[in-house]
Image: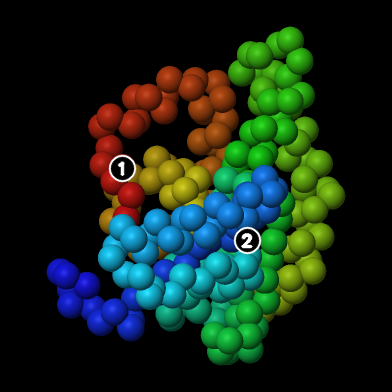
Amino acid sequence: MKQNKIPVANVFTAISSGVNIQAQKEDKKIWIDQLINAFRLNNNEPDRKVAVIDVVEEARLSHLGIVPEARRYNTFLIDIGSGNTKGGYFPYGNTKDFRSFQLTWGTKSTFNAAEKMLGEDKGLENFNSQLNRVLAGAENNEIVYAVNASGAFPKSDNIAFSGGIAWAVATLIVPELNDNAVVGVTYDEVLEFTEKLAKNPSLLLRLLPCKNLTRK
């Protein structure tokens, strides 16, 4: 508002579904009210409207903000978060009707499930083994069903991944494309990169200092 002179009426504030879900899990819905009140106070906007959005609306807004307009109606978005994964697509050529896609798995929840299965062996090889077991179970019990239920395949020519982990992997695989709005990577490239890290974790440490990893 100060730098770009954007009218107050054109600035929207929302509490993400992940924050709301966590508050519900902890039976601490008061956290949301405290967060909203603190935001209004810190920004000196006592009348600021702050919406608490659900998973479907968050996925819809993510699609509008992430996917280029030219690919809006033929792209299936998968937004990988820490606690869950969400996304979807616009099946009817408008931005009101949105077909959602949801999973209870995210990067942190997947890690936690694998960690619980380690037992006494805390080594990386055992962790990777347990991680593959968790992923196989998630695929068989939830992922395949969720993708099929969304009906995305017949109507989507493109699949776009977003979220911190998607950004990090794409940036590390093709750092020269870091400034591009859309970066294409193949499944085989991701698999090869994952296998390299599993065999040599120090590779990541060598990559980080020499690349511009400023998140866009």
| Amino acid beneath label 2 | Lys
Residue 146: % across, % down: 77, 62
Residue 200: % across, % down: 49, 20
The residue sitting at 68% across, 53% down in the picture is: 24
Q: How many marks?
A: 2
Query: Could you tell me if residue 18 is visible in this image?
Result: no
Q: Is residue 103 positioned above or below 95 on the image?
A: above
Q: Which residue is mark 1?
A: 213
Q: Is residue 128 left or right of residue 136?
A: left
| Along the viewing direction, whichever of 187 and 214 lies nearer the viewer | 214
| Along the viewing direction, whichever of 65 and 128 lies nearer the viewer | 65
Tell me the element at label 2: strand
Q: How is the image coloured?
A: rainbow
Q: Which residue is mark 2?
A: 86
The residue sitting at 38% across, 73% down in the picture is: 48
Residue 172: % across, % down: 40, 40
The residue sitting at 28% across, 65% down in the picture is: 44
The disc, 1 or 2, on the residue closer to the chain's N-terminal end is 2
| Along the viewing direction, whichever of 104 and 165 lies nearer the viewer | 104
| Amino acid beneath label 1 | Leu
Quarter in which the C terminus is drawn: bottom left
The residue sitting at 18% across, 77% down in the picture is: 5
Q: CA distance from mark 1 to mark 2?
A: 25 Å
Residue 26: % across, % down: 67, 45
Query: Could you tell me if residue 49 is visible in this image?
Result: yes
Quarter in which the N terminus is drawn: bottom left
Tell me the quarter of the picture where residue 41 sits: bottom left
**Numbered badge on residue 107:** none
Tell me the element at label 1: loop
Near mark 2 (Cα within 10 A), the count class, few <14, some 14-19 or many ≥20, is many
